[in-house]
Amino acid sequence: MFARLAILLYAIVSYAIFTVSFLYALGFVGNYVVPKSIDVGPASNVVEAIAVNLLLMSLFAVQHTVMARPAFKRWLGEFIPAACQRSTYVLLSSLILLLLFWQWRPIPAPVWQASGVAAWVLTSVHWLGWLIAFASTHMIDHFDLFGLRQAVLAWRGAEMTDQSFRTPLLYKIVRHPIMLGFLLAFWATPAMTEGHLLFALANTAYILVALQFEERDLIAVFGATYQEYRRRVPMLVPGLLARRRNEDRRPVGAPR
């Protein structure tokens, strides 16, 4: 019972730290409220800023990608209980994010500055992106995604079962709405600086590469079911869905 309680408390603490990192991310990317953000902080040499920022983002990308792979999960299972694995992943990801926020070097040189209606539209899309990312976690299983479900099952002594393949709501439009939300939040800003542009470009590259690994793992788990889902639903851009459906309806040999 003590071990089960420890697993539950570990998951709760991990989730709490994730919540702090997520809320700080809102202010960091949008330059709201927080004392240090993507464009607000001590000045530094541009070369140093680029090097440090890329190193921080690379650290997050490597941890996020490696720990998500099935082979690493099997290796990790030799040292910690299965019920702790997701919480450990969430905890380390959140701590690295907090490190990134703390050590980020702003590069405030402007790339574009929108005003008026354009600024309102970009700000609205920015917040829509965050809403899509957060809401999409609840469309599948938010608490499983962040390790709480596994810990509660362990505390109850219940068997951990794998989640079934589902495509609710936004998952019928794009395969990865969480990542779509992040991309909107990162790119939609009325005041784009060189530092913010570096952040958006690096994270976009990471997302596009990481999704290839994730899709390979999903095909390995769900097989033909996921391959059919890939055929019907675009990865990130909803507008491609109608075009794909129209192409599927065309007779064989018809010009495209």
Image: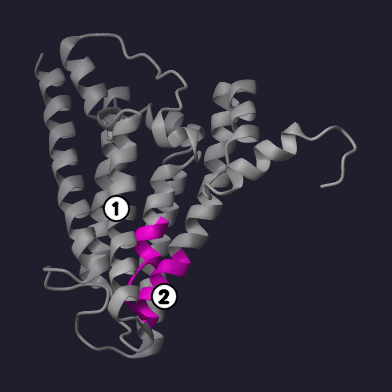
Residue lying at 79% horizontally and 35% vertically, measured from the top left = 250
Up/down of 223 relative to 44, above or below = above
In the rendered image, the vertical position of residue 11 relative to residue 207, given as above or below: above
**x then y, percent, for residue 125:** 34, 60
* Lower position in the chain sequence, tag 1 or tag 2: 1
The quadrant in which the N terminus is found is top left
The crowd level at tag 1 (other Cα within 10 Å; few <14, some 14-19, many 20+) is many
- Which one is nearer the viewer's eye here, 15 or 187? 187
Side of 231 where 93 appears, left or right:
left
Q: Position of residue 157 (x, y in %)?
A: 20, 9
Left or right: residue 244 versus residue 26 is right
Quadrant in which residue 233 is drawn:
top right
**Does the stretch in magenta take in 185?**
yes
Query: Looking at the picture, does residue 96 appear above or below residue 111?
Result: above
Counting other residues with Cα less than 10 Å from the Cα at mark 2, is it few (<14), some (14-19), or many (20 or more)? some
Q: Position of residue 174 (x, y in %)?
A: 50, 41
Q: Give the percent coordinates (x, y) of residue 108.
A: 30, 86
Residue at (31% x, 54% y) in the render: 128
Task: Please give the range of residues in magenta.
Answer: 183-202
Q: Amino acid at mark 2?
A: Leu
How far apart, in angstroms, are the residues tagged by discs 1 and 2? 18 Å
Q: Which disc, if any, is residue 197? A: 2
Point out which mark residue 172 bears.
Answer: none
Name the magenta segment's main secondary structure.
helix
Image point (36%, 73%), residue name: 53
Mark 1 or 2: in front is 1
Mark 1, residue position:
130
- Looking at the image, which residue sits at the far right? 253
Q: Secondary structure at mark 2?
A: helix
Which SS class for mark 1?
helix
Q: Quadrant of residue 184?
A: bottom left
The residue nearer to you, when weighing 42 against 242, is 242
